[in-house]
Amino acid sequence: MKEKMNETRADSIYKKAKSELFHIWKKARLLYDMISEERELPDSVKKNITSAYEAIDESIRYIEYEDIFPSKKEDLEQDTDNNFLTNQDKRYPVPVNSESGDQFVTRCILDANMKKRYPVQTDRFQACMQVFNSSRKKPTSGQNPGEKFEDPMEPRSPEVSDPIKPILP
């Protein structure tokens, strides 16, 4: 039901835009016929004609650009079933069953998101090793190779229980 409403709304917007462009075209032809070389145009009329031209030209340029270079949103929607890592989804690498520790650490250190998160290679190496070691402790069956992990380098509050107050005499 919502899809029909969205289609109807899109159709009405489309028809309204086409109607407005048709009337602009009709009035532009009429104005074109009214203007002659002998007629002196006030500056305000010249300014309005120039601004109308610039607005239409900007709209044409936008639509031409979108036809040549479509928006990235469409590309992301089509690739929703991708299970592997991409740099667009901001995920960190997780070891795969067929990967050795050296292979994972190499892939993890070279990962663009890890480089962004940990610019210093030693920090990146330490984080990758912690991810690898923590994943070996957990069962790996059904694990998504691109799932997010708890950041091992994130500062945590110390787990100190409330101190015992001494009893004063």
Image (tube, helix red, strand yellow):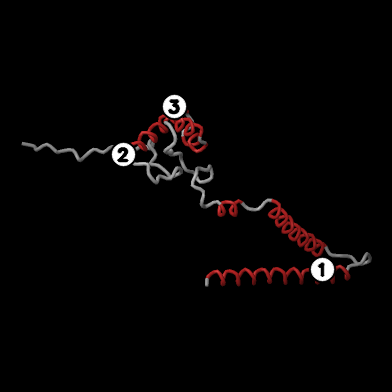
Q: Quadrant of the C terminus?
A: top left
Task: Identify the image quadrant of residue 126.
Answer: top left
Element on which disc 1 rests: helix
Q: Which residue is mark 3?
A: 122
**Residue 103 location (% of width, % of height):** 46, 31
Q: In the displayed image of the protein, which residue is found farthest to the top? A: 122
Cα separation between marks 2 and 1: 69 Å
Number of disc labels: 3
**Type of amino acid at the residue the image marks with label 1:** Ala
**Type of amino acid at the residue the image marks with label 2:** Ser
- Residue located 78% across and 63% down the image: 48
**Type of amino acid at the residue the image marks with label 3:** Thr
- Residue located 44% across and 27% down the image: 122
Of label 3 and label 2, which has the lower sequence position? 3
Q: Which residue is mark 1?
A: 28
Mark 1 closeness class: few <14, some 14–19, many ≥20 residues within 10 Å: some
Task: Identify the image quadrant of residue 13.
Answer: bottom right
Element on which disc 2 rests: loop
Q: In the displayed image of the protein, which residue is found farthest to the front? A: 98
**Residue 70 location (% of width, % of height):** 66, 53
